[in-house]
Image (spheres, grey):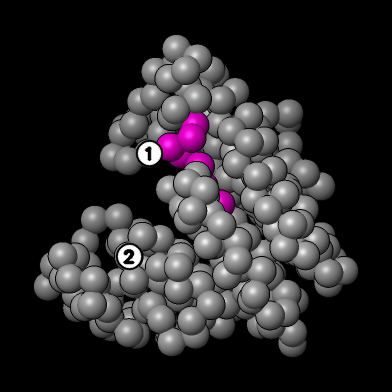
Amino acid sequence: MEKLTIIKVGGKIVEEPDTLNCLLDGFARIPGYKLLVHGGGRSATKMAERLGIDSRMVNGRRITDSDTLKVVTMVYGGLVNKNIVAGLQARGVDAVGLTGADMNVILSEKRPVKDIDYGYVGDVKHVDGEVLSYLVGKGMVPVMAPLTHDGKGNILNTNADTIAGEIAKGLSSYFDVTLVYCFEKKGVLRDENDDCSVIKEITPELFRQYVDDGVIQGGMIPKLENSFSAIDNGVKQVIIKQASDIGDCTAGTVIRK
């Protein structure tokens, strides 16, 4: 099987010119087949503010009402996505910007209301790995915005970490997939105040131990749960690292069975 590298990068990195250029330089140098998934939350919040639309967050997740949906569609699928695509084209990478609605690559359902009504937020039902693998195999580099659709004409705001994990699963039948989550820290840390305390490797047994000991907590728990779910569904390995270390094979935390 050919190797495929899927990079997920947070909005904070793609929204600042310096960090975006560093990311694009590193991503362009990754050999072989690749795919990029991006966020863009801070840009969406700024645009909503300029338009007089309140941004509401619960437990770090955006409440997406009808006005907010218009903003995230414009910002994620337009401004942020096309800036990345243009930047990659300038570096000789034949990138194509997509949402889940394009070519029906990611179908979702609107999240059911339980304790909280998140609004127009999608939970992924299906990724069309065949279509994505065709694009990748033809030498194109998909750049995925965190938007999906329900097949009934509705765009849905969808968590970018989840999209990256589900795409990785969907492409694992076609490629030898490595999924890389890039964020601000150098990896999963033993001590969140010490950037040098990177845990080099985490297995399911170590993960449970670190959670019990309080070493791993908060938002890192669902990120690692997504990682293990990807590995259980055919992804070869997941790496969590700093975006500036994108080209360093020895950097970050490797998640393995």
* Residue 223 image-quadrant placement: bottom left
Residue at numbered disc 2: 185
Q: Give how far apart the Cα atoms at labels 2 and 1 are.
A: 20 Å
Expressed as whole percent of the image width and height from the top left, the position of residue 225 reads 38, 65
Expressed as whole percent of the image width and height from the top left, the position of residue 114 reads 37, 33
Is 165 left or right of 79, judged from the image as shown? left
Amino acid under disc 2: Lys
Amino acid under disc 1: Arg
Point 43% across, 29% down: residue: 45
Residue span colored magenta: 38-44
Crowdedness near tag 2: few (<14), some (14–19) or many (≥20) residues, C-alpha within 10 Å: some
Picture layout, residue 91 above or below residue 77: below
* Residue 140 image-quadrant placement: bottom right
Q: Is residue 109 magenta?
A: no
Residue at numbered disc 1: 61
Q: Nearer the viewer, residue 102 or 122?
A: 102
Point 51% across, 72% down: residue: 246
Picture layout, residue 56 above or below residue 242: above
Furthest residue to the right?
138
Expressed as whole percent of the image width and height from the top left, the position of residue 198 reads 27, 78
Is 138 left or right of 195, judged from the image as shown? right
Q: Is residue 171 visible in the rendered structure shown here?
A: yes
Quadrant showing the C terminus: bottom left
What is the secondary structure assignment of the residue under circle 1? strand
Q: Is residue 39 magenta?
A: yes
Point 47% across, 56% down: residue: 19
What is the secondary structure assignment of the residue under circle 2? loop
* Residue 27 image-quadrant placement: bottom right
Picture layout, residue 175 above or below residue 107: below
Expressed as whole percent of the image width and height from the top left, the position of residue 118 reads 43, 31
Is 114 left or right of 120, judged from the image as shown? left
Q: Nearer the viewer, residue 225 or 192?
A: 192
